[in-house]
Amino acid sequence: MWFDLLKTIAELRRARPGDLLLAAEWTRLLRHDRVQLSDIAEEPLVNCCTEDSGNQII
């Protein structure tokens, strides 16, 4: 479930890079006590992967 949320917010951030609410939600998600990814919370998103028709990341 967490990965789905992360993927959704990442997709929305790519589509709307100037949306401050999405940026804040992204940061909040990555800084959550159980996640502890504060080091990358402010890093830019990059396109590194694509999905094939079977939803496999390639």
Image (cartoon, rainbow, N blue to C red):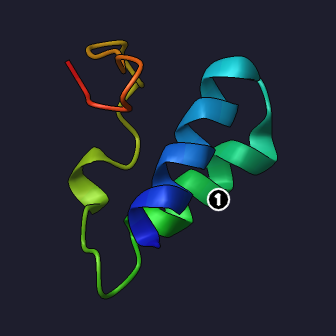
Kindly identify which residue carries mark 1.
25
Observer-nearest residue: 10 or 51? Answer: 51
Residue 1, position as x, y percentages in the image: 47, 73
Residue 22, position as x, y percentages in the image: 71, 46
Observer-nearest residue: 42 or 50? Answer: 50
Residue at image position (61%, 21%) is 14
Q: Quadrant of residue 32?
A: bottom left
Residue 10, position as x, y percentages in the image: 53, 38
Helix or strand or loop: what does disc 1 sit on? helix
Residue at image position (55%, 60%) is 5
Q: Quadrant of residue 54?
A: top left
Q: Amino acid at mark 1?
A: Glu
Vertical order, 11 against 34 (above or below): above
Residue at image position (40%, 41%) is 42
Mark 1 residue crowding within 10 angstroms, few (<14) / some (14–19) / many (20+): some
Observer-nearest residue: 53 or 39? Answer: 53
Q: Is residue 17 visible?
A: no
Q: Report the side of 17 relative to 39 (left or right).
A: right
Observer-nearest residue: 41 or 57? Answer: 57
Taking the view exactly as shown, the residue that stands out farthest to the bottom is 33
Vertical order, 28 against 27 (above or below): below
What is the count of numbered marks?
Answer: 1
Residue 25, position as x, y percentages in the image: 64, 59
Q: Is residue 6 visible?
A: yes
Q: Report the side of 6 relative to 18 (left or right).
A: left
Vertical order, 45 against 27 (above or below): above
Residue at image position (35%, 17%) is 52
Quadrant location of the C terminus in the rendered image: top left
